[in-house]
Amino acid sequence: MNETVTVTYDQLQAALQSADADSGAAESHGLICGIICAAGTSEPALWLDHLLGAGNTISAMAQSGQLLLTELYSESLLHLNDGDLGLVLLLPEDDTPLPLRSKALGEWCQGFLYGLALGGVREDGVRKGNVGEIMYDFFEISNTRFEHELTDEDEEAAYAEIVEYVRMSVLLCHEELRPLQAPQRLQ
């Protein structure tokens, strides 16, 4: 499976800023993935208003952001369901300063939690088990102000480990939250 995405962080971030959206690129992708994990599929109306801002769909800039968000939703849905673990978190490129990447990762986790809530997942309903632990961890990541005091190599390794933990946790949430589907021959 090709793990590349056609919507880039910089492209979506620029479109959302131009549209004066309520969310940035990382938070938007997190929210989209959270909704997919919680609800399986979702109508864009459910999440576009939350990402662009209520009623912010008319301007050309908002419509450009809307098109990119819809494409990102389709890609995310495909990657979460492909069975190849091909999900790639939409985060700034590796040449972006680490404090900015760390902040974006926190926003991604915050968006994911919000997406779970929009999709109907409640903390009290998943308190026990993997999903509850992941929600707690993502809350902690989203509220952590990373201090970069280690050597550059150590900081990069720690960041990469956290990104991989988040990515695999999203795949686990998707697996545990999606409704059981009948085998193909029974449908």
Image (cartoon, helix red, strand yellow):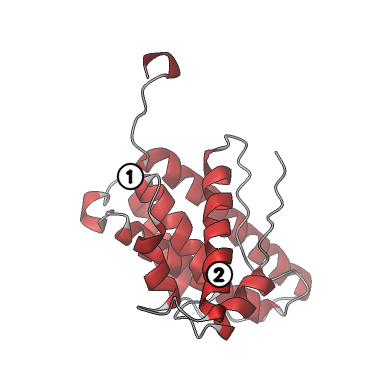
Question: Mark 1 belongs to which amino acid?
Answer: Gly
Q: Name the residue rendered at 68%, 55% in the picture.
A: 5
Mark 2 falls on what kind of element?
helix
Question: Mark 2 belongs to which amino acid?
Answer: Ala
Between 113 and 65, the one lying in front of the other is: 65
Examine the rendering and report whether any part of residue 117 can be seen.
yes
Q: Is residue 76 left or right of residue 183?
A: right
Compute the Cα span from label 1 to label 2.
26 Å
Q: Give the label, 1 or 2, closer to the camera.
A: 2
Q: Position of residue 123 (x, y in %)?
A: 26, 57
Disc 1 crowd rating (10 Å Cα; few below 14, some 14-19, many 20+) is: few
Quarter-wise, where is residue 96 in the image?
A: bottom right
Q: Position of residue 107 (x, y in %)?
A: 50, 73
Mark 1 falls on what kind of element?
loop
Quarter-wise, where is residue 185 in the image?
A: top left
Q: Name the residue rendered at 37%, 62% in the picture.
A: 45
Q: Residue furthest top?
A: 185
Q: Which residue is mark 2?
A: 26
Quarter-wise, where is residue 1 in the image?
A: top right
Q: Earlier in the sequence, mark 1 or mark 2?
A: 2
Q: Position of residue 134 (x, y in %)?
A: 41, 54
> Where residue 129 is drawn, which disc sits there?
1
Between 37 and 78, the one lying in front of the other is: 78
